């Protein structure tokens, strides 16, 4: 698969992955970026702009937590709109991935 296609596929599911991580619990951006780097090899530079956009779209909100290892950390948590968006995107992903799997299963 060409690198361009891989990047586009990853970018296409990035918001869904962030919503999924936050559905399990609040997290700070570096923690989210680390999980995504480990899971789907997406770099930090992609995460921070996405987090700002998701906040301005009302999908997440932030709060500060004091840290013993430096400045306070900005944590992100899902809003009601974020939970609704996650459920909708999760359903869309399930239907889309099933359709792709059906097509791939029929390929020779």
Image (cartoon, rainbow, N blue to C red):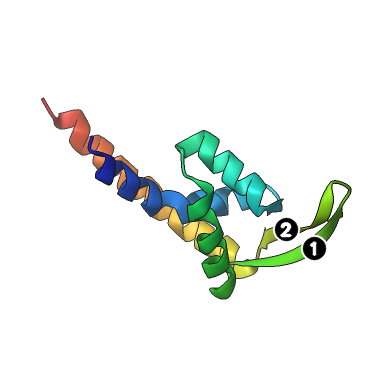
**Rendered view: 58 above or below 3:** below
Does residue 23 appear anywhere in the picture?
Answer: no
**Rendered view: 31 above or below 87:** above
Figure disc tally: 2
Give how far across and how far down residue 42 sits, in percent: 46, 44
Give how far across and how far down residue 28 sits, in percent: 69, 53
Where disc 2 sits, the SS reads: strand
Q: Which residue does the image show at 50% across and 53% down from the upper left?
A: 45
Q: Residue furthest left?
A: 108
Give how far across and how far down residue 61 sits, in percent: 67, 68
Say whether residue 72 is left or right of residue 99: right
Q: Which residue is denoted by mark 2 in the rendering? A: 75
Q: Nearer the viewer, residue 69 or 61?
A: 69
Q: Mark 1 and mark 2: span between their CA atoms?
A: 6 Å
Q: Which quadrant: the N terminus?
A: top left
Q: Which residue does the image show at 51% across and 63% down from the upper left?
A: 49
Say whether residue 21 is left or right of residue 91: right
Q: Nearer the viewer, residue 98 or 25?
A: 25
Q: Which residue does the image show at 49% across and 45% down from the upper left?
A: 43
Callout 2 crowding tier (Cα within 10 Å): few <14, some 14–19, many ≥20: some
Give how far across and how far down residue 47 sits, in percent: 53, 54
CB of mark 1 within 8 Å of CB of mark 2? yes
Q: Which residue is denoted by mark 1 in the rendering? A: 64
Callout 1 crowding tier (Cα within 10 Å): few <14, some 14–19, many ≥20: few
Q: Nearer the viewer, residue 46 or 20?
A: 46
Q: Nearer the viewer, residue 20 or 102?
A: 20
* Label 1 vs 2, first from the N-terminus: 1
Does residue 72 appear anywhere in the picture?
Answer: yes
Q: Which residue does the image show at 51% across and 35% down from the upper left?
A: 39
Where disc 1 sits, the SS reads: strand
């Amino acid at each position: 698969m060409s690198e361009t296609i891989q990047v586009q596929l990853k970018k296409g599911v990035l918001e869904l992955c962030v919503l999924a991580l936050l559905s399990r619990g609040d997290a700070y951006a570096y923690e989210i970026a680390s999980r995504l780097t480990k899971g789907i090899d997406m770099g930090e530079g992609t995460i921070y702009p996405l987090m700002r956009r998701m906040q301005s779209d009302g999908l997440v909100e932030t709060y500060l937590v004091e840290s013993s290892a430096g400045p306070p950390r900005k944590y992100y948590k899902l809003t009601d709109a974020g939970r609704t968006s996650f459920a909708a995107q999760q359903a869309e992903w399930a239907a889309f991935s099933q359709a792709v799997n059906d097509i791939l299963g029929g390929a020779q």
